[in-house]
Image: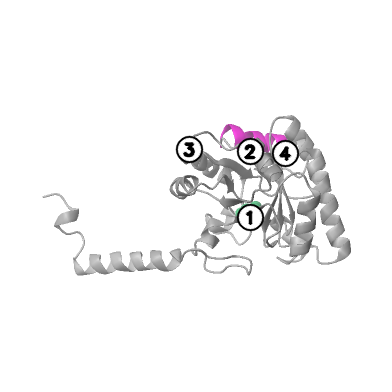
Amino acid sequence: TRRVTVRDIAAAKARGERWPMLTAYDALSSRVFDEAGIPVLLVGDSAAMVVYGYESTLPVTVDELVPLTAAVERATSRALVVADLPFGSYQASPEQALGTAARFMKEGRAHAVKLEGGRRMVPQVETLVSAGVPVMGHLGLTPQSVNTLGGYRVQGRSDEQAAELLADAKELERAGAFAVVLECVPNAVAERITGELNIPTVGIGAGPGTDAQVLVWQDMAGLSPRVAKFVKTYAALNETLAEAARGFAEEVVSGAFPDEAHSYA
Ligand code: KIV
Ligand code: NA
């Protein structure tokens, strides 16, 4: 088996094929997703919340995300591994963006990076792509901008906002991005952008009309305690894990564990 590449991603769009993306942050779960055939794994800055326990994505650092990226890459053999550039690690200049991306690719062995923002990020995207770094864009609800957006809310509801989103998406494509995430935008806006782009759109809270779909894996698998309206849970890991922990605790207290089968005579 060989790795999925950005060329495979482009070919999927040309064939009109939809594909799934999940976040990944550690070896065992990313191995499961790789073997389940998820073609693209994102080491999201959502690790800020689901791994590190921060309130938002803003505090997480490159130093915190690079080792998670390396773990995901080591544990997988097929998936394209995309690393999120965290807040403050790329916005200042194309040089800053390239320095950060190089760390994710050299130390984390990422195959691509993702960054948030539209037209204002074109210089960064151009510099990265010309240096050989595939870039995934991210538009709509961009969580690193929660303080300027005034909360986690649907973006692109007005015709004017929708036109801005389309213009941003087209500029990212022109700058060389290989895909663009559309987060929390109305279905019709996502569908319009998807139809006008030659690169795939990856929706999250953007309806059925995008080329791909992404979810945070702990949301998808029912481990997260609260999820947004757009999340569908495909398992109930929270209950499963809690039951396992309670079972273990009970048997330790009662002395039922460990028994003969689980010890050395
Ligand atoms: O950090 C993240 O998990 C993301 C995806 C949900 C798109 O950016
Ligand atoms: Na992110």
**Is residue 115 toward the left or the right of residue 222 in the image?**
right
Q: Residues within 10 Å of mark 2 (few under 14, many from 20)?
A: few
| Badge 1 vs badge 3, beta-carbon distance below 8 Å | no
| Badge 3 vs badge 4, beta-carbon distance below 8 Å | no
Query: Cα distance, mark 2 to mark 1?
Result: 16 Å
Disc 3: which residue:
74
Q: Residues within 10 Å of mark 3 (few under 14, many from 20)?
A: some
For numbered disc 3, what is the local secondary structure? helix
Q: Position of residue 206 (x, y in %)?
A: 70, 61
Mark before the other along the chain sequence, 3 or 4: 3
Disc 4: which residue:
97
Q: Nearer the viewer, mark 2 or mark 1?
A: 2
Mark before the other along the chain sequence, 4 or 1: 4
Mark before the other along the chain sequence, 2 or 3: 2
Q: Which residues are magenta?
A: 97-108
Q: Residue furthest right?
A: 160
